[in-house]
Structures are given as structure tokens and as C-alpha cells.
Image: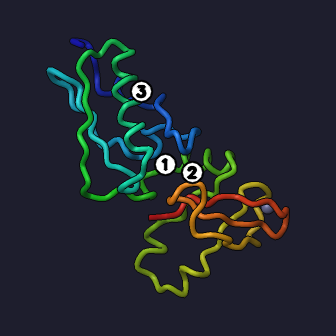
Amino acid sequence: VVSLSRDQVLAWLDEVYDPEVPVLSVVELGIVRDVVLGDEVVVVITPTYSGCPAMRVIEEDIVAALHSRGVPRARIETVYSPAWTTDWMSDGAKAKLESYGIAPPGRSADVGLVSLTRRSHEVVRCPHCRSLDTARKSEFGSTACKAIYACRSCLQPFELFKAI
Ligand SMILES: [Zn+2]
């Protein structure tokens, strides 16, 4: 543990994936806020959605990953403020989501405080064929953080990772 660096820990965490979005690591998702090195390794995280059942799994996976790298003492510290936003996802992470078939979130700043009219006209691009001719079918998909859309061009359904 003596030679352990913060960057090394972050590199290991970049191999821990979100069980609900298996193409994104916890680092790409933007939930890892800090890594504190001392007598133990403390990973500071901010949950994506409060009550998201995947968070418990993610916490266990992070500790297990550090144990497997020879870090005997590792723990999670959860910070709720400032709240996680999809804006913390990197552009690279959003591109990965789209190639995986999930429409990435738009900027939450664009949908948050702007008029509801604009929000309801949010244009979502089909991750399969890039068409903008899409329609929301359901507010909730496989998880609460996603909505179900249908593409009128290629007729394929897809999920949108909602901006928050
Ligand atoms: Zn399409």
C-alpha cells in the first residue's frame, strides 16, 4: 500500500462496471468523487439515483476490486451533495452508451430550468440509425433512470438514459 497512488486506484476503479449499464465504469459514470489514501483506501462516491438498487452492488464491487488488487482495507464513503448529475458523464462515456444502443442523456442544464414546453419537445436521436424521428413510449424502462423510445425510421425500440 506504500507505493499506492490515487491514479492507480482510479485506474482499477475504471475496471468496475455499472451492472445496469455494463459498458460504463463507475469512473466514466462520474460517481467516483474522490479517492483518499491513508491507513485505508476510502473511495468517495455519489449515488446516481437515490434508491437505485445497483448502488449496493457497485459499492461491493468497488471494495472487492480493491481487495483483489491487494488493498486489505478499503471502504466506501457516500456523499449526497452536490447531487449526481448526468453532466458528470464524460463525452466518451456518452458515446459508448450510444454505440451500446442506449441514447445518452442530453445536458441536464438544457432541460432542468427551461420551460416545460421545451422539455416535452426534447429531441432524442435513435442510437441505431441516428434518426431524430423518435417518440417516447414509456417514462420508465428497465430501470427508473431510463425511458423507452421508439424510432419511426428503423422501427427499433431503444432506451434513453434520462438527464438529471
Ligand atoms: Zn432508428
Front residue of 33 and 140: 140
The residue lying at 41 percent from left, 30 percent from top is: 61
* Callouts 1 and 3 close, C-beta under 8 Å: no
Q: Earlier in the sequence, mark 3 or mark 2?
A: 3
Residue at the disc numbered 1? 90
Residue at the disc numbered 2? 94
Q: Position of residue 86 (x, y in %)?
A: 45, 57
Q: Report the amino acid beneath label 2.
A: Lys
Q: CA distance from mark 2 to mark 1?
A: 6 Å
Q: What is the number of callouts on the image?
A: 3
Direction from residue 149 to residue 1 in the image, left or right: left
Residue at the extreme left:
39
Quadrant including the N terminus: top left
* Callouts 3 and 2 close, C-beta under 8 Å: no
The circle on residue 11 is 3
Q: CA distance from mark 1 to mark 3?
A: 16 Å
Structural crowding at the residue carrying mark 2, measured as other residues with C-alpha within 10 Å and reported as few (<14), some (14–19) or many (≥20): many
Structural crowding at the residue carrying mark 3, measured as other residues with C-alpha within 10 Å and reported as few (<14), some (14–19) or many (≥20): few
Secondary structure beneath dot 3 equals: helix
Quadrant including the C terminus: bottom left
* Callouts 2 and 1 close, C-beta under 8 Å: yes
State the image quarter where residue 117 is shown: bottom right
